[in-house]
Amino acid sequence: MNNKVIRRQKIRYRIRRKVAGTTAKPRLSVFRSNADTYVQLINDENGQTLASASTRDKDIAAQKGTKSEKSKLAGQAIARKAAELGITTCVFDRGGYLYHGRVKSIADGAREGGLQF
């Protein structure tokens, strides 16, 4: 493994020590690959993914725009799914990435959709 991956892994572990999702307040986890961005609502008490969205979803992938703009749509999609499940609050897990660019776009989109964190 290269140093960049190891560094991010250490940051992830540090964040995960403090951030955990519950049934009432799940964890909004972000994963960023080179091409796409994925986001999940996770209940860590029983290790269950409650809802997920990504820039690969058909309606989002069909949109024109930058990766950040598509990430914002993914954030709005996860907020919509959370509202259907009756979830209004969550804890944000940036997954070791800087709170900037696509990660920030997801957070902004989720907030616009009505999620609070």
Image (cartoon, rainbow, N blue to C red):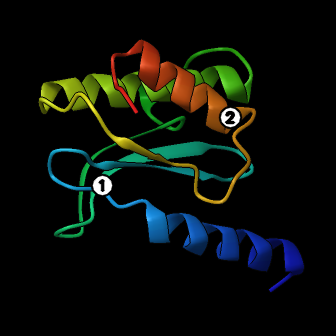
Q: Is residue 109 left or right of residue 95?
A: left
Can the viewer see residue 24 in this picture? yes
| Three-letter amino acid code at the position of disc 2 | Arg
In percent of the image, x 53 and y 30: which residue is there? Answer: 107
Q: Is residue 63 above or below residue 48?
A: above
Q: Secondary structure at mark 1?
A: strand
In percent of the image, x 58 and y 16: which residue is there? Answer: 63
Quadrant for the N terminus in the image: bottom right
Q: Is residue 102 left or right of residue 83?
A: right
Q: Pick the residue in front: 65 or 105.
A: 105
- Residue 110: percent from the left, percent from the top? 44, 25
Label 2 vs 1, first from the N-terminus:
1
Q: Is residue 97 above or below residue 116?
A: below
Disc 2 crowd rating (10 Å Cα; few below 14, some 14-19, many 20+) is: many
User: Mark 1 = which residue?
Assistant: 42
Q: CA distance from mark 2 to mark 1?
A: 20 Å
- Residue 116: percent from the left, percent from the top? 36, 26
Q: Pick the residue in front: 15 or 43.
A: 15
In percent of the image, x 37 and y 16: which residue is there? Answer: 113
Quadrant for the C terminus in the image: top left
Q: Is residue 117 left or right of residue 47?
A: right
| Three-letter amino acid code at the position of disc 1 | Ile
User: Mark 2 = which residue?
Assistant: 102
Q: Is residue 5 above or below residue 97?
A: below
Can the viewer see residue 61 in this picture? no
The outermost residue toward the right is 3
Q: Pick the residue in front: 64 or 52.
A: 52
The outermost residue toward the front is 18
- Residue 44: percent from the left, percent from the top? 27, 65
Q: Secondary structure at mark 2?
A: helix
- Residue 83: percent from the left, percent from the top? 20, 24
